[in-house]
Image (cartoon, rainbow, N blue to C red):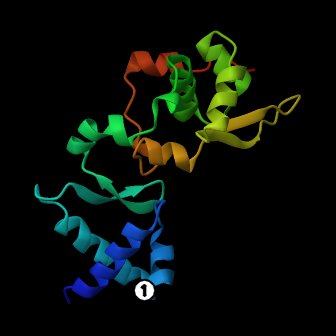
Amino acid sequence: MEFIEEAALVEAVLLLEVEPVEESVISKVTGLSKEVVLLSLEVLVDRFNGEEHGIEPVRIAGGWAFAPKERLWNILKERYGKQREDRLSRAALETLSIIAYSQPLTRTEVENIRGVSADGMIRTLKEKNLIKEVGRKETPGRPVLYGTTKEFLKIFRLKSIADLPKLDELEEERFALDGPE
């Protein structure tokens, strides 16, 4: 079986969806089994692999979506990426990096790593839906623990947190906590 018709159906779903869509949702929408959806996605990945295509199906934030190929995105992101007012400051990016690499962690733990107050940065990152409250730490006062969101994965084109670039030894030391809260 070549899954040509099935792949075309899955392709149409990916084009119509605004957000990345999980295999189980594609299966429900199309009436195809999850196995056929997975095989159809493989067909699409192969089909869009060539240089003649500007987009490709990619796994982002636990789902699938069409996205510009990486080599083209670097050219297009200025116009089609987040607008300037949505850009993050250097301090916000630093805070986001700390949370992404060390999650879950508390505001105080972020401040211990950064060396400055993180209230404003955490508020900004929450407003932009890049981080969220993921629980409470089992210490006195039960401070809020923060982690990244699916929106974070989507914006940075990551399948999961495991896809973050690896830190070298010096960077790992910087992100390490220097003791209890």
Q: Nearer the viewer, residue 100 or 25?
A: 25
Outermost residue toward the right? 141
Name the image quarter holding the N terminus: bottom left
In the image, residue 96 above or below residue 65: above
In the image, residue 77 above or below residue 19: above
Amino acid type at mark 1: Ser
Q: Which of 18 and 159 is in front in this view?
A: 18
Quadrant of residue 7 within the rendered picture: bottom left
In the image, residue 94 above or below residue 42: above
Residue at screen point 43% across, 80% down: 34
Q: Where is residue 78 in the image (x, y as percent from the top left)?
A: 34, 34
Instruction: Decide if residue 177 is on the left or right side of residue 88.
Output: right
Residue at screen point 20% across, 54% down: 54
Q: Position of residue 30 (x, y in %)?
A: 44, 84
Quadrant of residue 56 within the rendered picture: bottom left
Residue at screen point 39% across, 46% down: 157
The residue that disc 1 covers is 33
Q: Position of residue 102 (x, y in %)?
A: 57, 31
Secondary element type, mark 1? loop
